[in-house]
Amino acid sequence: MSGAEVLDVGRDAIWLTIQLCAPVLLVGLVVGVGIGLIQALTQIQEQTLVYAPKIVAIFVSLLVFLPLMGALMSGFMRNIAARIAGM
């Protein structure tokens, strides 16, 4: 395996990591900003208020996006297996 192929696999792995993490992180970001906005508007400054809705939202988003994540991982593994078989 040449250096260019190693860099190509590394780039694909980093892109896959971004694709896997982005939906869950965006859901956490939106819920966190929404709760923060509600806290600012109502002047409720309870620090623990953010955690329960955020945990539930991230759990639900993991359930929703799990098939997509599995398909992405499966495609990447097929790509890696094809590269190994092609050596």
Image (cartoon, rainbow, N blue to C red):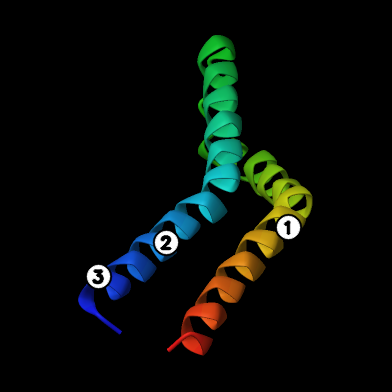
* Label 1: which secondary element: helix
Q: Which residue is mark 3?
A: 4
- In-image side of 48 versus 87 (left or right): right
Mark 1 or 3, nearer chain start: 3
Give the mark toward the camera: 1 or 2.
2
Quarter containing the N terminus = bottom left
The residue positioned 59% from the left and 47% from the top of the image is: 24
Crowd around label 2: few <14 · some 14–19 · many ≥20 (10 Å): some
Give how far across and how far down residue 2 sits, in percent: 25, 80
Quarter containing the C terminus = bottom left
* Label 2: which secondary element: helix
- Give above or below for 38 relative to 29: above
- Give above or below for 38 relative to 22: above
Q: Which residue is mark 2?
A: 12
The residue positioned 53% from the left and 15% from the top of the image is: 43
Q: Amino acid at mark 1?
A: Leu
Give the mark toward the camera: 2 or 3.
3
Using the image as rendered, state which of residue 63 and residue 67 is in the foreground: 67
Using the image as rendered, state which of residue 84 and residue 65 is in the foreground: 84
Q: Which residue is mark 1?
A: 66
Give how far across and how far down residue 12 sits, in percent: 42, 61
- In-image side of 71 versus 23 (left or right): right
Crowd around label 3: few <14 · some 14–19 · many ≥20 (10 Å): few
- Give above or below for 70 relative to 50: below
